[in-house]
Image: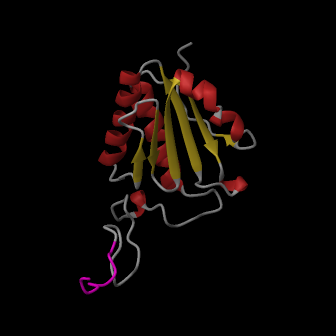
Amino acid sequence: MAPHAGPSIAPWTTPSNGIVSPILRSGPEHDLTSRTREGRSGALTLLKRAADAAASKKAIDPVALDLRELHGVCDYFFICSASSEVQVKAVAEAIEEKLREMGARPWHVEGLDGRRWVLLDYVDLVIHVFHEKTREYYLLDRLWGDARSVDLGLERTD
């Protein structure tokens, strides 16, 4: 048995401080760590940019939910759909690219290969890009039905 080399350190941590944000650059415009009464304004900014990116790829039925009062897993959910697996991937990649331009990096990405439900976890904001049929099956919007909706400021095209 080989001698123990010590604890492994995750890429977003350092021995000196424990945790370093995996997603943001420094500066007030990128700060998701300071909570205000209205919530984390940085997360809300990311939410609105994610909605813009999704709309640019013709995402279907975008919905934003404010989970702060429900003490959910994050502050905000962004949920949208796409009509094909190719479009699911395109929407998810457009969102990730737009948020990366702002200095945000997802802490975790899941489902990109399967293209039925892509989850982009930005810690305070979790983005769900569904295939239409998958969204209908899981009804995530209804599961979090007690959450307040957030106005995304998107123009209606229907």
| Occupied quadrant, residue 96 | top left
Q: Residue at x 34, y 84 (%)?
A: 16
Residue 111 picture location, percent across and down: 42, 39
- Eyeballing the image, is 49 above or below 44? above
Instruction: Magenta stretch: give its range.
Output: 1-9
> Magenta span has 23?
no
Q: Residue at x 41, y 57 (%)?
A: 29
Q: Residue at x 63, y 36 (%)?
A: 140
Residue 1 picture location, percent across and down: 26, 82
- Eyeballing the image, is 152 above or below 81? below
Q: Nearer the viewer, residue 65 or 30?
A: 65
- Eyeballing the image, is 56 above or below 27? above
Q: On the rendered structure, is 50 left or right of 12? A: right
> Magenta span has 4?
yes
Residue 22 picture location, percent across and down: 37, 62
Residue 67 picture location, percent across and down: 65, 50
Query: In what quadrant of the picture does the C terminus appear?
Result: top right
Q: Residue furthest bottom?
A: 3
